Image: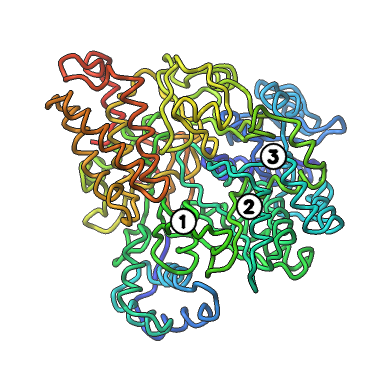
Amino acid sequence: METFEPWSPARAEQIIAPHLSREGALLPILSALQETFGCVPREAVALVAHALNVSRAEVHGVVTFYHDFREAPHGRRVVKLCRAESCQAMGAETAARFLLAALGLPTDAPWGGTTPDGAVTVEAVYCLGLCAVSPAALVDGEPLGRLDGMALAEAVGA
Amino acid sequence: MIRLFVPGDSAAVAVGADKVARALAGEAARRGLPAEIVRTGSRGLAWLEPLVEVETPGGRIAYGPVAPGDVAALFDADLARGGAHALRIGPPEAHPWLAAQTRITFARCGVVDPASLSDYRAHGGFEGLARARGLGPAKTIEAVTASGLRGRGGAGFPAGVKWKTVADAPGDSKYIVCNADEGDSGTFADRMILEGDPFVLIEGMAIAGLAVGARKGFVYSRSEYPHANRAFQRALDLVHADGELGAFDIELRVGAGAYVCGEETSLLESLEGKRGQVRAKPPLPAHRGLFGRPTVVNNVLTLATAPWILTHGGEAYAALGTGRSRGTQPIQLAGNVKHPGLYEAPFGLTLGRIVMAIGGGTASGRPVRAVQCGGPLGAYFPVALFDTVYDYEAFAARDGLIGHGGVVVFDDTVDMAVQARFAFEFCALESCGKCTPCRIGSVRGVETIQKVIDGVDVTANLELVEDLCHTLKFGSLCALGGFTPYPVMSAITHFPEDFRAPDTRLGDIRPPQGGEQGLE
């Protein structure tokens, strides 16, 4: 389980500074901010744009292009569940439905999300490279393979 | 001292390898046996993971799949001497699945300690780089050209030609970019190298750098690979501290969840800190790539094969394979297959042999119905095409691709209309938005296939899908839009019975499991 620091411009500048000399620093900076704060809050966009001497629109464009960057932190537990072909072939959808139903999250679009109490976030991912042990997921960053709905629910205490 | 080997590969960890390693350490301590546990990569026999090996005077002996609860019984059965037990496999190299392979790119994976440079050197590490230093740039490129090695990311472009282009291109600085953004479902070979033999990739990049005159290399990996990224960074730190690479520097960069960044120009944009939108070619990255400089962009497997080629000579590699597909391909077997894992073999096997003889058919025990080769942009092959020879040209001749070497098996509960719809859904989700046919055509594709599934004007809508696929194929800059027609059209062509009106669709008279495959 990850814990994140509350947003602080001073702390953000500390995080940004060592990256400024790198070639193509924007993605590493955004990833580092998200690692610390659990998200890339709106306030960060202007700060990063200023530090790199690029427009806010450019930074906003990058933040919104990539699936990983989020505006608000995810739940205390995070399940990244693979929905790609290899896992489909081994019943990932059945496992997903079981977990989502157990957590009271939507199984139709928008699929997944965070439980109202902020306990668990379920996200779709498309391939974790664990296709030889499908169906697979990352639970708080730890790989889990040959899983079913029960194993998933157990892993997050649902 | 008992020496045990337990994979630290994330697929093995996903099925309990860490717990097994802890149980082994605990049990050895309880019995007062001094033990060393080496965390290796995976041998690639995924159905036997966690696969535990023990060092004996007669070589290693393997046991698997081992659960933490088996550990005490294994010690009781004299594990230290490779004693008999129900889980005993014997010498891993003698296992038929491994013995029949030709391990070149994956020669060390699962064998060596990926965190030990001395182990890497003891297994022939850095011999290729030393040979390249002796040969000089021109002869190094000649060796790679003579090997016939083609880009293992999927495009199959001759690596030697690419290196020569970059070497000849004028530029004050040049780059080696390793594409480790392995986003294709059913593929995991890059991840296995990053985790199981990271030094071979580092050595391959150094050889490429020497060949083209680049001093800086980037490895662009994925955020979905946290374990691989940690393992590779650890290896990079060891190599940098060791000084083997001299002035050549390598940096690991991690993407942020965009499939399209596996496309080389999109990857370069991302490395530059921009949205991962594809670039029009020309200019080729070999002429104007990263930061506008001449750049080699090669897949992990391409670069990881270069050290072997330099050590053993280009001709030795070219002696393997068939037609214009020379050398070996690390085939990745996944999906509903009895024996999933990594199988490296010279090009030239038939698809049927790969799926039935090597893969052992389905895991569910039901008949195989479809096999998707080459990731989410690859075609679905029916059993009727199992005589297709596994090489670039033979697959292309049957409107398919081998791509990055993924082979995903589906049993007879699959609904191919749902799979065709998923191909469009995935394209819509991951489109970078640059080309209209891909950005909008994919969304229209989802809607139109849905109409077919719902039995609305089936014939007219299938014609519309075909027309749409034509537009995507010829109106997109990169393979995401350009190749999405492969899974869609192959599903329609080879499995027409799944695209009829609902009352006649086989999907509705087959057992209800069929419906569970879909993304409703």
Estimate the spatial distance between the alpha carbons at disc 3 and disc 2, rounded to whole Å. Answer: 12 Å
Whole-percent x, y for residue B394 in the image: 54, 26
Residue B3 appears anywhere in the view: yes
Discs 1 and 2 share one subunit:
yes
Quarter of image, res A94: top left
Report the side of B30 relative to B371 (left or right): right
Q: In the rendered structure, which amino acid carries the disc numbered 1?
A: Lys
> Which mark lies nearer to you, 1 or 3?
1
Chain letter for mark 3, please.
B
Quadrant of the rendered image containing residue B57: top right
Report x, y in % for residue B288.
54, 64
Check disc 3 and give the amino acid type. Answer: Gly
- Pointer 2 residue: B162
Question: Percent x, y for residue B9?
Answer: 60, 44
**First along the sequence among labels 3 and 2:** 3
Q: Which mark is residue B258?
A: none
- Lower sequence index among marks 1 and 2: 2
Q: Residue at x 68, y 55 (%)?
A: B164
Q: Residue at x 75, y 28 (%)?
A: B93
Residue B399 falls in which quadrant of the image? Answer: top left
Q: Considering the numbered disc 2 on the image, is that residue within a helix, a strand or a loop?
A: helix
Quadrant in the picture for the N terminus of chain B: top right
Circles 3 and 2: CB atoms closer than 8 Å: no
**Mark 1 vs mark 2, CA separation in Å:** 15 Å
Image side of residue B53 versus residue A29, left or right = right
Closer-to-camera residue (B133/A158)? B133
B243 vs A6: above or below: above
Instruction: Give the labeled residue for mark 1.
Output: B281
Circles 1 and 3 in contact, beta carbons < 8 Å: no
Q: Dot 3 surroundings within 10 Å: few (below 14), some, or many (20 or more)?
A: many
> Residue tagged by mark 3?
B148
Q: Is residue B273 above or below residue A85?
A: below
